[in-house]
Amino acid sequence: MNRTSFHPLTIGLLLLTGIAAPLLFPAYTNQIAILWLMIVFASTWDILGGQMGYNSLGNIVFFGAGMYTSAVVQIGLFYDVGMYTSGARTTHIVFTNAQYFTGFALGIIAAGIAAALLAWATSWIVFGLRGPYFAIGTLGVAVAAAELIASWEWVGAAAGISMPVFPGAPDTQKLFFYFLLFGLAFVVLVCLRSLYSTNFGLAINAIRDDEEKAEAMGLHTRRYKRTAWSISAFFLGIAGAIFGNMTGFIDARDIAFPTTTFNIFMILMVLLGGKGTFWGPVVGAVVFQVIKEVTWTYFLGWQFVALGLLIVIIVVYFQQGIVGWLMEKYPERFGIRVAPKKEEERPPAIGLAPHPEGAE
Amino acid sequence: MTDAIIELTKVTKTFGGVIANRDVSLTVSRGGITGLIGPNGSGKTTLFNSIVGYHPIDSGSIRFDGQEISQLRVQEIARLGLLRTFQTTRIYGRMSCIQNMQISIPHRKARFWDMFAYERADVVQRAEHLLAFVGLYEKRYLRAGSLSFGQQKLLEFAMALMNEPTVLLLDEPTAGINPTLINGLVDRLKRANQEFGITMLIIEHNMRVIMNIASRIYCLAHGEMLATGEPAEIQRDQNVIDAYLGAH
């Protein structure tokens, strides 16, 4: 069974990296903050995609749902949401410091809960599907959610919402959001490590290996699937709330439900790092974020060609991913033991059939 | 008549125009080993699938411990304590043997928060004990998928025992197993029956095995119950001999 928690050294290294990174590379604070977000994306996608074997193309729904929930809570606590988002609004609205921070804190909590509840509710529909049908079904949910929100006047429709402005200097703002995203990623990793060492981890692995067998053994497969989907949604909802406030402006198609960017990145990072491994999504996120930043900076205009090329290369030549490849190459280092193919396990020759090697 | 734990009354199951089972009635007595034989395609596995709720039956009744179960789903039936193994062995290939065992604990008592329960010493101990029982203790940390076919079959049997079933339905437990291992397996089936008190219904093609362990045998042919009786009676039954030799 997996270890129940991180080695103290791992925790120390994670904290050190997280705290030192923005101090060492202040110019890249935002990029590193996004890296932590990517780690959250990849690790939460891997709960279903890697550990449970359900490839979801709709996880972005919970990111967007969390983002909009927090926006509505942050605004709705102090003003009328319909008035705030109205295109004809003329009054200038200012949030006091206290209003901003209470709203934000409550918004984050509400975002996580709302996303998890949405996952619990939609699970009744999507988990009737398996394999490729599940993937397409969840993609349908994501596209529908984007269109639905983009035509809902009360939350600004296609015009989006300008979020309350952070009351502080730009540098403070940068660090504030950096540490929120780092904190989230840290909590996600610690929680998942613990979660995978419980019955939950075993059960979702069993569902991945043979769901029909798991059912025949009486496992509550639906309950586990629904919970896995909701846990993933909870963290994505919180990520959405933080990211929405970080960008300061949200809209349905490009920021809250970006089905062709963030949604695809999640899967790509996991495939790159290694599906179903704990550190694979993290490694994948780091490598991917570096590739992405380089191509976005130096090959602007060609970035989606580079992205497409990366997808093709991974899918064709490198399906097991970086960590998956290492585990295959050095299984002992990861505590995996594979039965040696021993001589005596060959079925014995029956009757007078000659021994394959001839003489004894 | 001894105390019946499974009672099938006039079970019929058709797939389109094909009648897989027609008016099949069968009784499994509590605590015993019952055999189910029949030529290939006679509807044995279909009957198993009907009992464990894999597909709905067209008519008839299936009672388990006095309760009608023909309307229940696979997991619900499994949680009642009626468990089956598969003809094509199914284990969780990418998990280690001990993990395969740990997730096979009985789920009938599982509450919501049990999902997040950590590894328990008594579960591990029981898993190791049962792995030793089937002779896989030394291989407990190996990936189940890397075991040989015969070993996977033994693992599947151990997983079924881990689940503490009342009744175990075994679909060809000796198929594909090295002949020298069969005796060991037969011995373990008998011990599981006697020591753990598990009632068994076994589909088997190996006549030597089934005549040896079952106290009562049912023979299916063309989806209908052809004969039933004690092993010695079945061996003498002309209808059974004809069915196997292709007189039908």
Image: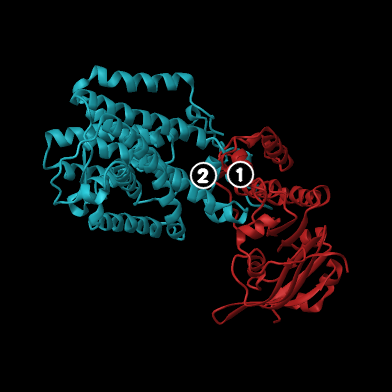
Q: Report the residue marked by disc 1.
A: B103
Residue farthest right in this picture: B1
Residue A145: image location, x then y, percent:
30, 55
Q: Is residue A357 visible?
A: no
Quarter holding the N terminus of chain A is top right
Chain shown in red: B
> Which residue is painted at 45% across and 18% down in the image?
A9
Residue under label 2, please give it: A205
Q: Chain of mark 2?
A: A
Please tell me whether residue A22 is drawn above or below residue A348 in the rendered image: above
Residue nearer the viewer, B39 or A252: A252
Q: Chain of mark 1?
A: B
**Mark 2 residue element:** helix
Which residue type does callout 1 highlight? Answer: Ile
Above-or-below relation of A33 to A346: above
Q: Position of residue B126 (x, y in %)?
A: 71, 38
Crowding around mark 1 (Cα neighbors within 10 Å: few <14, some 14 to 19, many 20+) is: many
Task: Give the alpha-carbon distance from disc 1 to disc 2, as whole Å.
Answer: 10 Å
Q: Is residue A23 left or right of residue B42?
A: left
Chain letter, cyan in picture: A
